[in-house]
Amino acid sequence: MTNILKDYWQAYLWSDGPHFSGLAITLWLLILAVVIGFLLAVPLSIARVSRNPLLSVPVWCYTYVFRGTPLYIQLLFFYTGVYSLNVVRSQDFLNAFFRDGFNCTVLAFGLNTCAYMTEIFAGSIRATPCGEIEAARAYGMSRFTLYRRIVLPSALRRALPFFSNEVILMLHSTSVAFTATVPDLLKIARDVNSATYASFTAFGIAGTLYAASAFFLIWLFRRGELRWLAYLHPRTR
């Protein structure tokens, strides 16, 4: 184990030669996927709870498809399926985008986590107390102001525990990125295993790094919950 750590610790953590790899790529994939998913999920969750079927039904179909199919299949669809289309290869931008495995991975991860976040946020919006909404309307707030100042801030705070679970699950899901030749943490572990045949050590190091990252994220979200959800905690005298 000492020799593997000495020879491959840089590859596991951040760099395999001139390119980033290992934990650095895994965390970068996670950040991009979560940011993209969050930015898309907020407006989609509003559409999801809309009474207008022209808004809610397409969003429901999107979340149903992406939550009902494995992430591995979605990644293969974008990495190999979409690029096989003539219309994609004939367009310079689309050809360059879908030819890069990293781009396809970020797209698949972002759309997948967005589907789950949309349902999480939509559920939190539906759980907004009626009293808060009635008070805002009595105050004369417009629908846009109501969502901006009352509904969304309240819903996002309540959704934080479920959002944190989704982020942890997405961290674990990044392990399929090696399918698109992305040098993530699992791919480095597979390469080390192929070079040394020390499977227990190679994958054990990767598992330790995944666990350490997950525990750090749990700690961060726990701190956020204690701060932003303090008003939900029972007061003690």
Image: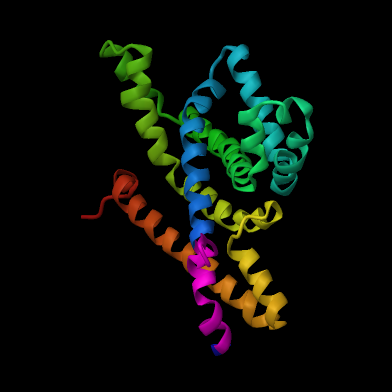
Quarter assignment of residue 21: bottom right
The residue shown at (59%, 58%) is: 172
Where does residue 191 sit, x and y in percent of width and height?
A: 67, 71
The residue shown at (54%, 22%) is: 49
Q: Which residues are magenta?
A: 3-23
Is 36 magenta? The answer is no
Where does residue 111 sit, x and y in percent of width and height?
A: 60, 37
Vertical placement of residue 223 versus 36, above or below: below
Vertical placement of residue 158 versus 152, above or below: below
Is 13 magenta? The answer is yes
Vertical placement of residue 217 versus 88, above or below: below
The residue shown at (68%, 51%) is: 180
Quarter assignment of residue 85: top right
Instruction: Tell which of 128 and 237 is nearer to you.
Output: 128
Q: Is residue 132 in view from this perspective?
A: no
Instruction: Tell which of 71 and 42 is nearer to you.
Output: 71
Instruction: Tell which of 23 and 40 is nearer to you.
Output: 23
Quarter assignment of residue 157: top left
Q: Residue furthest left?
A: 237
User: How many numbered marks, from 0 up?
Assistant: 0
The residue shown at (51%, 63%) is: 18
Instruction: Tell which of 135 and 203 is nearer to you.
Output: 203
